[in-house]
Amino acid sequence: QVRLVESGGGLVQAGGSLRLSCAASGRTFNSYVMGWFRQAPGKEREFVAAITWSDGRTRSADSVKGRFAISKDNAKNTVYLQMNSLKPEDTAVYYCAADLGVAIIAKMAVEYDYWGQGTQVTVSS
């Protein structure tokens, strides 16, 4: 069992920044991928960014490239999502997810095995 706990969401004005954190605990694997997804009201959950835990390869959605950055701290078992130049359309619940036993970054939510409870990000115009 893996437990994921997100933090760092909140209300920010357009153009502002937030950093989300996701602390992982429980069963460990030699290789896995940690990802961030988001879901706005009335919309499907969409891929934001992900990182391979073993070697730090990253992948981001086109909509956030150049604005968001994913990183990790192995010692703290924590993955971060630094969000800059936020836009109102970034408003959503952001979820952390783990895809275990793999080294390839998937963009489909169904590929991920464990999920956090989500954290709300609201960007005002």
Image (cartoon, grey):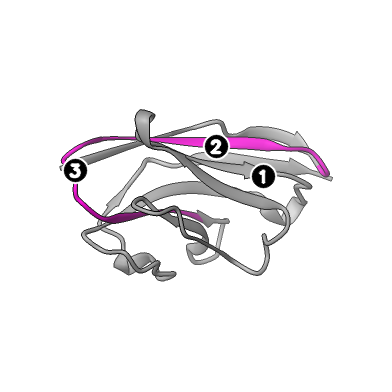
Which residue bears the numbered disc 3? Answer: 28
- Give the image location of residue 60, x and y in percent: 57, 63
**Looking at the picture, which amino acid does disc 3 mark?**
Thr
Q: Secondary structure at mark 2?
A: strand
- Residue segment shown in magenta: 14-37
Quarter of the image with the C terminus in it = top right
x%, y% of residue 100?
24, 56
Residue at the spot of label 2: 20
Contact between marks 1 and 3 (CB within 8 A): the answer is no
Reading the chain from its start, which is encountered first: label 1 or label 2? 2
Spatial separation of the CA atoms under disc 1 and disc 2: 8 Å
Q: Which residue is mark 1?
A: 83
Q: Residue at x 67, y 41 (%)?
A: 122
Whole-percent x and y of residue 26? Answer: 19, 35
Q: In terms of secondary structure, what is the magenta stretch mainly? A: strand
In-front residue for pair 103/55:
55
| Mark 2 or mark 3, whichever is nearer to me | 3
Q: Indicate left or right for 9 with 36 as reference.
A: right
* Residue 21 higher or lower than 112, as above or below: above
Query: Which three-letter amino acid code belongs to the residue tagged 1?
Result: Met
Q: Dot 1: within a 10 Å radius of its alpha carbon, few (fewer than 14), some, or many (20 or more) residues?
A: many
Please say if the residues under marks 1 and 2 sit with CB atoms less than 8 Å apart: yes
Q: Is residue 115 above or below residue 76?
A: below
User: Residue drawn at (39%, 54%), measured in percent from left and top?
Assistant: 55
| In magenta segment, residue 63 | no
Q: Which quarter shows the N terminus?
A: top left
